[in-house]
Amino acid sequence: MPTRLYALKHGASLVWSPETVDKAVLHTERVVDRELHPVLQLRPLTSPLAVTGVVSYNGKTKAIFSTHPIEKPYFIFQIGSADPEIAVQAAKIVQNDVAGFDLNCGCPKPFSTHSGMGAALLTNPDLLCSILSALREAMPPEIAISAKIRLLPSEEDTLKLVERIINTGVSALTVHCRTRNQRKREPAHIDRLRAIVEFVEGMGRGVAVIENGDCESYEDAFRIRKITGAC
């Protein structure tokens, strides 16, 4: 949350949460803290009014996630899920504190993939799209639905998956320009994103394509936008 508030202070248009597994949200208690949040006491990032009223969704031993009303119009909750019904249940619990939901289909770590979440969804497009469709149907139109994916080994398969995702009614698509088996030490395939951007533009749905991977500076952002046409 402090990082998101800091980003918004400096002009970010949107901010995302880390991936939060849907089941972790189901048994949380929503608590509003009217006092100064202890994390923000260390380094207040906005006006004093903006660091009180923190909303926490508390589990049995800790807060599953925290947010503040000032970030609600910009806050995208990234959800990990392998079940449309559970995804919708979790989304309904937190929907009044967020601007949208982003389905994580790119995390390659075992904690996510062993349960069929994250990058495991890339090989199960029926399930991936059913989760997105369920979220889109259950949420009001002002709540955005989006997805984050990785590249599939071939351009053809990647575009087939992208087409299916766009047809679920998403507002945006983030593409991590690495395949499931690649890690950060390996260069991202930035050059492959231009074809995806042009393909999505050709569908005429007004869906934003957001680049992820090897974009770590102001200069990187402009270089990658010039190469790919992505956000």
Image: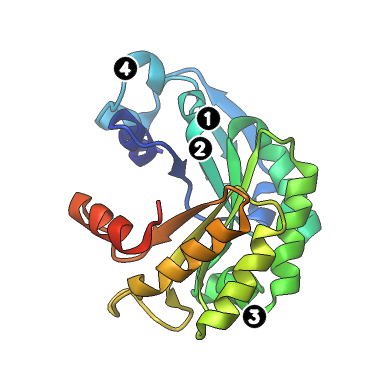
Q: Is residue 116 left or right of residue 183?
A: right
In terms of sequence position, does the residue under pointer 1 or pointer 3 come before the other? Answer: 1
In terms of sequence position, does the residue under pointer 4 or pointer 2 come before the other? Answer: 4
In the structure shown, which secondary structural element does the residue marked by tag 1 occupy? Answer: helix
Kindly identify which residue carries mark 4. 47
Whole-number angstrom distance, CA of label 1 to CA of label 2:
5 Å
Amino acid carrying label 3: it is Thr
Q: Position of residue 175 (x, y in %)?
A: 47, 64
In terms of sequence position, does the residue under pointer 4 or pointer 3 come before the other? Answer: 4
Q: Nearer the viewer, mark 4 or mark 3?
A: 3
Q: Position of residue 93 (x, y in %)?
A: 71, 39
**CB of mark 4 within 8 Å of CB of mark 2?**
no
Amino acid carrying label 4: it is Ser
Kindly identify which residue carries mark 2. 75
Residue at 66% across, 74% down:
116
Q: Nearer the viewer, mark 1 or mark 4?
A: 1
Q: Is residue 157 left or right of residue 191?
A: right
Q: 26 or 143: which is nearer to us?
A: 143
Picture layout, residue 36 above or below residue 146:
above
Kindly identify which residue carries mark 1. 72
Kindly identify which residue carries mark 3. 123
Whole-number angstrom distance, CA of label 1 to CA of label 4:
16 Å
Q: Confirm whether residue 77 shows in the render.
A: yes
Picture layout, residue 32 above or below residue 64:
above
Amino acid carrying label 1: it is Lys
Give the image quarter of residue 147. bottom right
In the structure shown, which secondary structural element does the residue marked by tag 2 occupy? Answer: strand
